[in-house]
Amino acid sequence: MLTGMIHRPQSMIVCHACDLVHRCETNQAHVRVRCVRCRAELYRTRSASIDAALALAVTAAVLFVLSNAYPLVELQLNGSYRQTTLIGAALGLYRQGYAPIAALVLVTTVVIPLFQISSLLYVLLPLRRSRRAAGQNELFRALTRVRPWAMSEVFMLGALVALVKLAAMAEVIPGIALFSYGALMLTLSGLTSITPTEQFWQWVEDSRA
């Protein structure tokens, strides 16, 4: 019998495009793995450092505060002024009897981005110091499930379309929050692209070394 050998179970990954099962042999640095059948990207690691992810997360936190602290847009009609915030837009839909849509807007544009930013800061700050946050694995799994519901780009597109239509009836003055939320949308997209699931687990493995 051979001694001194450790047999580690090999992990498997399924292609999201064609459902072909692949065996993950090793976790290598700076790797980009594609499906052997359809050439779809399975995962990549080392697309960025923890420092870059933390910088984007902090930037997103600042932009999130600005997006909720300042008016989203201001309307001037017949000498009267009205302005609304991001949360005020959801409350306005609720007062008009669109409670389900208001809840959807609030969750996808405020709650989920806040959860995404705070979760990444919570798990990445300790990993930066080669430590582990309590419940980091469970929290990141929850974040992975929630991410597809973050629809800031859909909200921005709808807001721009509405503002173009309102411009024909009243003077529309874009607020600071509109620009900061647009920047937040781009920042969150970049943050998601450099913190895929495989990259996070690679950082976790590095913290144990």
Image (spheres, rainbow, N blue to C red):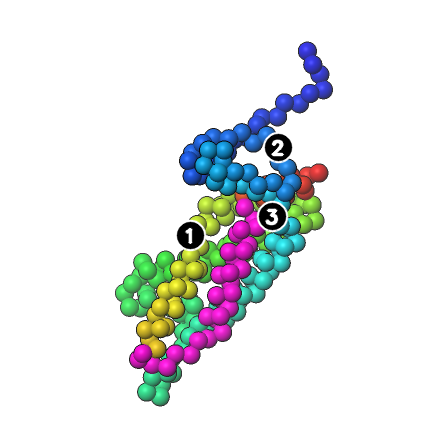
User: Quick check: is 35 in the magenta stretch?
Assistant: no
Chief secondary structure of the magenta portion: helix
Q: Residue 127 appears at what percent x and percent y?
A: 65, 47
Q: Which mark is residue 47?
A: 3
Q: Earlier in the sequence, mark 1 or mark 3?
A: 3
Q: Which residues are magenta?
A: 168-196
Q: Amino acid at mark 1?
A: Trp
Q: Which residue is mark 1?
A: 149
Q: Which residue is mark 2?
A: 26
Q: Amino acid at mark 2?
A: Thr
Label 1 residue SS:
helix
Q: Split into 4 quadrants, where in the image is the N terminus?
A: top right
Local packing at callout 3 (Cα closer than 10 Å; few below 14, some 14-19, many 20+) is some
Q: Earlier in the sequence, mark 3 or mark 2?
A: 2
Viewer-proximal residue, 121 or 167? 167
Query: From mark 3 to mark 2, how far is it between C-alphas?
Result: 17 Å
